Image (tube, grey):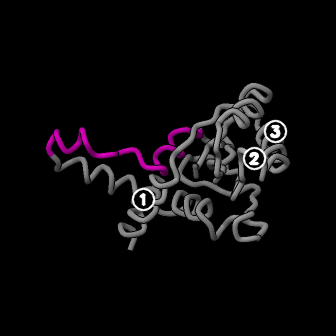
């Protein structure tokens, strides 16, 4: 199943080690790495930069045109616009609608999980089983993995593009 995963570590150096290890196991029987990026939230918490990346899906070294590039591009630019769109949606809506509406987008998710100057490993993967990454990144390196279904992310990106135009 296609997923976007955000992996974080207490020690930033482990983020780079994790990227190296994920590259080594890509295209195993249970995991295919499509794109990856090490992203960092800036000093004031309003922007993100790509520190390192790769894109096996398009064959480019830098994952700026693919799904990861779009996520970081939207995070790095009009994040305030997106937050305003979500708050605006919630402000004039009845409580039943609010209960049923998904209000946490991929952008909110990433922005809320990384502190100022913190780095995270953003992965676009096709994963049949969670065990391989859990063993490698959580048990061996002490990281935290949070996965989001690709379809939900794709929907968030399409909606964000509509609101940004």
Q: Are marks 2 and 3 in contact (CB under 8 Å)?
A: no
Is residue 119 shown left or right of residue 94? right
Which region of the structure is painted magenta?
Answer: 94-114
**In the image, residue 66 lies at what x, y percent?**
62, 67
Is residue 12 shown left or right of residue 160? right
> Which residue bears the numbered disc 2?
29
**Residue, far left:** 94
Query: Which of the marked residues, 2 or 3, is nearer the chain's N terminus?
Result: 3
Magenta stretch encompasses residue 102: yes
**Viewer-side label of 3, 1:** 1
Q: Are marks 3 and 1 in contact (CB under 8 Å)?
A: no
> Which residue bears the numbered disc 1?
155
Between 125 and 164, the one nearer to me in the picture: 125
Query: Which residue is at a point 73% across and 63% down the rendered structure image?
Result: 55
Magenta stretch encompasses residue 30: no
Up/down of 115 relative to 83, above or below: above
Query: Which residue is at a point 61% across and 59% down the rendered structure image?
Result: 68
Label 2, residues with CA under 10 Å away: few <14, some 14-19, many ≥20: few
Query: Which residue is at a point 49% across and 43% down the rendered structure image?
Result: 109
**Residue, far front:** 29
Label 3, residues with CA under 10 Å away: few <14, some 14-19, many ≥20: few
Query: Which residue is at a point 17% across and 48% down the rendered structure image?
Result: 93
Between 142 and 73, the one nearer to me in the picture: 142
Q: Secondary structure beneath disc 2?
A: loop
> Which residue bears the numbered disc 3?
13
**Viewer-side label of 1, 2:** 2
Per the model, the C-alpha gap separating discs 2 and 3 is: 28 Å
Image quarter of residue 51: bottom right
């Amino acid at each position: 199943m296609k997923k976007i995963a955000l992996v974080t570590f207490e020690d930033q150096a482990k983020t780079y080690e994790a990227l190296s290890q994920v590259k080594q196991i890509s295209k195993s029987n249970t995991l295919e790495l499509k794109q990856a990026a090490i992203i960092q939230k800036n000093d004031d918490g309003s922007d993100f930069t790509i520190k390192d990346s790769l894109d096996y899906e398009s064959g480019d070294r830098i994952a700026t045109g693919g799904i990861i590039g779009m996520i970081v591009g939207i995070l790095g630019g009009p994040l305030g616009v997106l937050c305003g769109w979500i708050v605006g949606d919630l402000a004039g809506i009845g409580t039943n609608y609010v209960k049923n509406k998904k209000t946490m987008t991929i952008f909110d998710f990433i922005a809320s999980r990384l502190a100022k100057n913190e780095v995270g490993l953003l992965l676009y993967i096709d994963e049949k089983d969670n065990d391989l990454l859990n063993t490698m990144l959580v048990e061996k390196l002490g990281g935290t993995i949070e996965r989001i279904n690709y379809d939900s992310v794709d929907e968030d990106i399409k909606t964000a593009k509509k609101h940004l135009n």
